[in-house]
Image (tube, grey):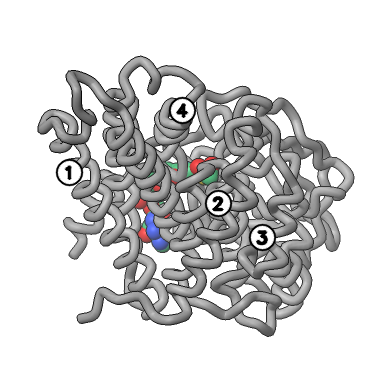
Amino acid sequence: MNFLLTEEQEMIRKMVRDFAKKEVAPTAAERDEEERFDREIFDKMAELGLTGIPWPEEYGGIGADYMSYVIAVEELSRVCASTGVTLSAHTSLAGWPIFKFGTEEQKQVYLRALAEGTKIGAYGLTEPGSGSDAAAMKTTAVLDGDHYVLNGSKIFITNGGIADIYVVFAVTDPAARHKGVTAFIVDADTPGFSVGKKEHKLGIRSSPTTTILFEECRVPVANRLGAEGEGFKIAMMTLDGGRNGIAAQAVGIAQGALDASIDYVKERKQFGKSIGQMQGIAFKLADMATKIEASRLLTYQAAWRESEALSYGKESAMSKLLAGDTAMEVTVEAVQVFGGYGYTKEYPVERYMRDAKITQIYEGTNEIQRIVISKMLLAE
Ligand code: CAA
C-alpha cells in the first residue's frame, strides 16, 4: 500500500493549484456576488487539458486517471466551489456516460468536444416531481421514424444554459417504471430544446442552475445513449462516479476554509496574543484538519478504485456523505473562528459556508447516500 501521489498526479495538483490561485481565486467573490459564470476561465481550463483529464487521448483527453481528476476538482474548489462543480458536472455527469455507453461515433463527436473543452456538458435527471425518487420522472420520449420526440422538463440543471451538450433521461415505456427509462445526448441547438428559469441560490452562485425544457424536441435515434430501457442504470452508474466528484468539491471547500482560518488565527490578536495560541481555537483547527483528511482519503480511495476497475459505488457514496458533512461542519467552524469578521463578505469563509451546503444535497442528498450505502451492505 502506498499513499504517495504519482509524479503525474503531483504535477497535475501543482498545475491546477497555480491556475486556481492565479486565474480563479481573484474573481471568485465578485462572480459569487454577481451570479456570473466566466467562460474565459473554462476556456483556460480547456487549454490546460483539465476538461478531459480522465479521457483517452484518442477522444481528446489527456489520458490521466480519476485520482488526477478529483485532485483537480479539489484544488479548484479550494478557491471557488462553483468552478469545481462546473468541471465535475462536465466530466463526471456528461463525459462519463458517453465514454462508458457511447458508440464510437458519439465518442468521437461528443466526448471529444467535451474533453477538448470546445463544448460544455450537463446532465438532466431531476424533474419538479422527481428528485430523490429519480425513477418517477415524467419526461417522455416517443419514437417517430428516425427520431425520438421528447416532451417534458428537467430542473436544477448544473451548467444549464452554458452547456452545449446535455445527457438527459426520459421515459420510453411508462408501464415499466425504471426499466422504461432511456438516455439521450441532446445538442443545445436542437429545435424544441430550450433553457428556462435560472435559480438564484444560497451558494455556488457563479455556477448556473436552470430548468431545461423539451417541447416536441426531435432527437435523432443516433443520439440515444445505450439501449432503450437502459437509462436508469446509466443514470445511477453515472452518479456513482459523480458523487465522488462532489466529495472532492467538498474536500476542497473545507480545505479552503481551513487555509483561511489558519492564516487568520496567526494574525488576529486578542488578550495580548494571537488567537491561534488559545486552545479553544487551536483544537478547532485540529478537528477541522482531521475530518478533512479522513474525507480526502475516502475520496482518493474511491477514485483509485475506479481507476483500478474495482467497484466504487459504495465508496463514492461514503466519500460524498462524509466529505459533504465535513465541509458543512468545517465551514461553520471557520466562520466561528473568524467571529464577527467571518460573518461579513470581507473574508471568504461566509462564501465557503454557503457553498458547502449544496454538497449535502445534490447528486443525491446525504440521506440518499445512506440508502445507497446500506443497500449495498445488505446485498454483500
Ligand atoms: N449501478 C447500477 N445499477 C443500479 C445502481 C447503480 N449504482 N443503483 C440502482 N441500480 C439498478 C438496480 O440494480 C435496479 O435494477 P434491476 O431492476 O435490474 O434490479 C434498478 O436500478 C432500480 O434500483 P432501485 O430499486 O434501488 O431504485 P429506486 O427507484 O429504489 O432508487 C435510489 C434508488 C438510490 C434512491 C435512486 O433513485 C437515487 O439515487 N436517487 C437519488 C437521485 C439523485 O442522486 N439525483 C441527483 C440528480 S443529479 C445532480 O444533482 C447533479 C448536479 O446538480 C451536479
- Numbered circles on residues, count: 4
User: In the displayed image of the protein, which residue is found farthest to the top?
Assistant: 340
Front-lying residue, 358 or 7: 7
Label 2 belongs to which residue? 21
**Quarter of the rendering occupied by the C terminus:** bottom left
Instruction: Tell me residue 163's x, y (percent).
Output: 73, 48
Distance (Cα) linking label 2 and label 1? 25 Å
Distance (Cα) linking label 4 and label 3? 26 Å
Please tell me whether mark 2 sits on a helix, a strand or a loop: helix
Q: Compare marks 1 and 4 and give the one earlier in the sequence.
A: 1
Distance (Cα) linking label 3 and label 1? 33 Å
Q: Are marks 4 and 2 in contact (CB under 8 Å)?
A: no
Q: Are marks 2 and 1 in contact (CB under 8 Å)?
A: no
Q: Nearer the viewer, mark 3 or mark 1?
A: 1
Label 1 belongs to which residue? 286
The amino acid at mark 1 is Ala
Please tell me which residue is depicted at 18% across the width and 57% down the height of the picture.
377
Instruction: Tell me residue 312's x, y (percent).
Output: 34, 66
Please tell me which residue is depicted at 54% across the width and 62% down the height of the picture.
16
Q: Nearer the viewer, mark 4 or mark 3?
A: 4
Please tell me whether mark 3 sits on a helix, a strand or a loop: helix
Front-lying residue, 155 or 116: 116
Residue 347: assigned label: 4
Q: Compare marks 4 and 2 and give the one earlier in the sequence.
A: 2
Q: Compare marks 2 and 1 and give the one earlier in the sequence.
A: 2
Label 3 belongs to which residue? 45
